[in-house]
Image (tube, rainbow, N blue to C red):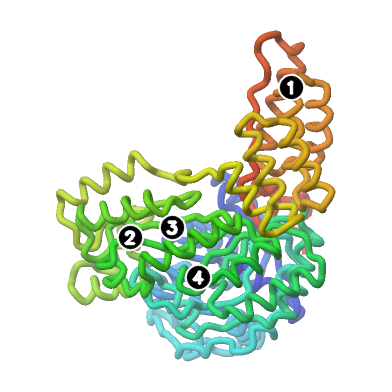
Amino acid sequence: MPYGMLTLATTLMEAGHQVKVINLSAFPWNRVEEALGAIGADVFGMSCFTANRRGVAITARAIKRMHPDAHLVVGGPHATALPEQMLSFVPDIDSVVLGEGEHTVLELLRRLGEGVTLEGMTGLACRQGARVTVGPRRDRIKDLDALPSPHRFFRTHLFMTSRGCPGECTFCAKSTTWGRTYRTHSDAYVLDALEAALEKLPVKMILVKDDTFTVDRKRVLRICEGIRKRKLSFLWSCDTRADVLDEEVLRSMRLAGCERLSLGVESGSPTILRNIRKKVKPEQVLRVTRLAKKLGLQVRYFMMLGNRGETSATFQESLAFVRDAAPHQALFACLSIYPGTDDFRFMERSGWIDPEVYFTEDFQELKVPFDASEQDTRLMSDWFEANRGIRTLHVPSVQECKDVLDRFGDLHTAHIDLAAAYYREGALDDARRHVHAALELGYPTPGLAYNYLACIDAAQGDHEGMMAWFDRAASDPLHPVLVRNVQAARQWWGAGCPRGEPPSLVARHDFELLERPEQPSLPGPLPPDFARW
């Protein structure tokens, strides 16, 4: 569920509207139609991004067929970038919200309730008979604290503390939605929202999904200090850039529970970085990677192939850079041309692309190298097919983990990292000792610690001990590795513990979350009263 749908719903609920948020993204179509038919709403809203635009069109048609008098409004990045085409090619949509939707949707509902025309309304495109009109853009919300936090009403591991990013990357459409101004919630708002979120979450993990969380280093230091003062115990990750990080910030983040940094690196070639206006140098990325490793933070690189000027030579530079920098993980993605980006605008002006293809063709995303030769495109495509997904490149040694623990003293996350390193090397008693130390210090995700203790007992032949730890961990096994192990151990135990065939177990504590499929964050089962107002 897009985070923006939750902020919109919260804003409308605070204003006194009755709101239902449902996630039908993985439902079979007959169930989608059944759910839509059961809900008698005055207004239906959907979020449209490039990859789901065809599903939005099909769902819009179904809504209008079942509820012809209802108003159907669509927002999101794809609709914001192409509002006229959205209304022209999808006649079942009545209006499109441009950019931030909270104030616009409030005004839309007021006008609909009063029977006032929508034509010329700020922040809205609409259909007037056969004409499509686009109103002036609405000013971005200056005081984000005036918006109620979605964590008051909804349970989600996603979390945002700001909107926008000062970067100007050519492949990114964030300015079309958020504008070019970077805006933040206040420190107190963020900390209060974190408390509200953690009260609802069974697994104390949060994914901070700001475009660039650490833009303002002093703000990050204050938030991290506030987390510690309030004794908020949880693990978290964030997305950011290498040029807005230093050792003091990284250390403060680790002490506040940060486990993983996802860095938008994109390329290891200075030429490509200049071409896409990244304004980050490879040596800055390398420096931050080394600092983060020194402090025990996991580092994940987001890499791209096919950007402006990409050749086999620049691509090999990227591969060599990633190999030498050795982040914990790297994830490569092909360039996708999103409406609202500078890449899209350049291609449109150059006659390389027609916006209508997003409505007349059946691709999911337009993944295409910007200007690479056919030979270089083939080379990159072949490599990508063989290297899809997250690639693990660095696993910390015992000595590395010891050094981190020495730097921080009794830090529960440093203890669990060292326990994992000992386990990998077969030093099981040392591993057990540090797992217990982490638990005594209040490790926020004890299920993963119990998983290590179960694996240690299994490796030492204590299968009753293994099952006892798994039983303790299985009360809410939302971690992927724990779900897998509990199932494997119970099957093995139920089969009578066949000799010579111990259960196949995995001992890991990567920052990886398996959320329970509950509405509306994930498309879980709809409650029996989902259509009752």
CA distance for labels 2 and 3: 11 Å
The C terminus sits in image quarter: bottom right
Frontmost of labels 1 and 2 is 1
**How many residues crowd mark 4 within 10 Å: few (<14), some (14–19), many (20+)?**
many
Q: Amino acid at mark 4?
A: Gly
What residue lies at 62% left-to-right and 40% top-to-bottom? 421
Frontmost of labels 4 and 2 is 2
Task: Give x and y (percent) for residue 164.
Answer: 51, 78
Instruction: State the residue position of label 4.
Output: 76
Secondary structure type for disc 4: loop
Task: Give x and y (percent) for residue 96.
Answer: 49, 76
Instruction: State the residue position of label 2.
Output: 268
Query: Would you place residue 218 above or below residue 296 in this image?
Result: below
Instruction: State the residue position of label 1.
Output: 460
Instruction: Give whichever of discs 3 and 1 has the lower sequence position.
Output: 3
Instruction: Give whichever of discs 4 and 1 has the lower sequence position.
Output: 4
Q: Amino acid at mark 1?
A: Gln
Q: Residue 462 falls in which quadrant of the image? A: top right
What residue lies at 52% left-to-right and 86% top-to-bottom? 118
**How many residues crowd mark 2 within 10 Å: few (<14), some (14–19), many (20+)?**
many
**How many residues crowd mark 1 within 10 Å: few (<14), some (14–19), many (20+)?**
few
Q: Nearer the viewer, residue 118 or 513?
A: 513
Instruction: Give whichever of discs 1 and 2 has the lower sequence position.
Output: 2
Q: Residue 66 falls in which quadrant of the image? A: bottom right
CA distance for labels 4 and 2: 32 Å
Instruction: Give whichever of discs 4 and 2 has the lower sequence position.
Output: 4
Per the rendering, the mark at residue 302 is 3
Task: Give x and y (percent) for residue 331.
Answer: 43, 51
